[in-house]
Amino acid sequence: MSQTAETEHRVSEVKPESLAWVERLVSIDTISRNPNLGLIETVRDELKKAGIEATITTDPRGGEWANLFATVPAHNGDTHGGIVLSGHTDVVPVDGQDWKSDPFKPEIRDDLLYGRGTCDMKGFIGATLTMLPQMQSMRLAKPIYFALSYDEEVSCAGAPLMIADLQKRGLKPDGCIVGEPTSMRPVIAHKGHQHVSMLRARLRGAFVADAQRPQRHRVRGTADLPHPRSGRRVPRARPL
Ligand SMILES: [Zn+2]
């Protein structure tokens, strides 16, 4: 996405360790069609050095695409509740685009960082990973989780696997911060996604928010949106 001047953040304002993390992540080509396992293993190994064992869930088509979920426990060891810091690790393609530098060799020009995914959303992932030492040194009242998914940009195949694994393990975080670029303005909830399979996932919680019409929407049992691949009809959100 493009940024306005007011939301641009200069590299000179960023912590050096944060910049190093972002550059490291951007250097790994994770265009959705390419495996992201290298990035996931990089993060897994760093978490392990900090004493945190991450859970990896891999794509059923093969082990080259993977999600990572890791818990920074509360000060009393509790791993219930708390906030998830969530980001997708894949990036959109660069084919045919007029890049002035290699999109996978992050480059600083005019105090700005250029590279595929610096904004969406390896910047967020790198910044949150940078905070790990502080998280571990604080008396956290509740846990903090890292949730990194694969294949968000194309088919949203990664996150559902990770969510299923959390359900299986009985983990119920209190909330989630998704570090998508929103011009530094918080967006509460999300009205959904045009892709019907994504809409299904979002509606499972019974309520969704509509950014244009802020009243709550409730799922009714009406089945009138066919799934684009299976043709199965799925519920559509309607105002209460
Ligand atoms: Zn994104």
Image (cartoon, rainbow, N blue to C red):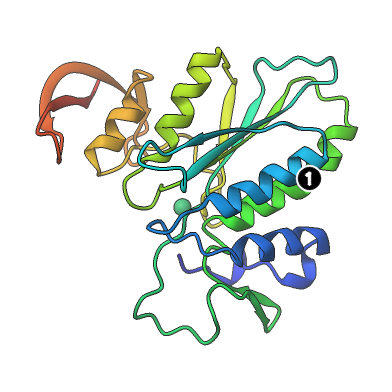
Instruction: Tell me if residue 46 can be seen.
Output: yes
* 132 in relation to 76, above or below: below
Describe residue 158's horizontal placement relative to residue 238 as left or right: right
* Residue at x 35% of width, y 41% of height: 61
Q: Nearer the viewer, residue 34 or 184?
A: 34
- Label 1's element? loop
- Asked whether mark 1 and ligand 1 are closer than 8 Å, the reply comes as no
Q: Amino acid at mark 1?
A: Met
Q: Which residue corresponds to the image point at 78% horizontal and 67% vertical from the top-left?
A: 13
Tell me the residue at 49%/59% (across/down).
30
**Residue 39 or 143: which is nearer the viewer?**
39
Q: Residue furthest front?
A: 62
Residue 3 horizontal/vertical position (percent): 52, 68
Quadrant hosting residue 223:
top left
Disc 1 crowd, CA 10 A, few/some/many (<14, 14-19, 20+) = few
Quadrant that contains the N terminus: bottom left
Q: Position of residue 41 (x, y in %)?
A: 63, 47
Q: Is residue 89 above or below residue 71?
A: below
Residue 192 lies in quadrant: top left
In x, y percent, where is residue 137? 90, 34
Estimate the x, y position of residue 158 in percent, counting from the top left. 42, 39
Residue 184 seen: no
Q: Residue at x 11, y 28 (%)?
A: 232
Count of numbered circles in the view: 1
Q: In terms of depth relative to the viewer, which is nearer, 166 or 55? A: 55
Left or right of 213, for residue 109 = right
Q: Quadrant of the C terminus?
A: top left
Q: Which residue, given by chain and number where applicable, does mark 1 sit on? A: 131
Is 108 above or below relative to 72?
A: below
Answer with the quarter of the image where residue 83 lies.
top right
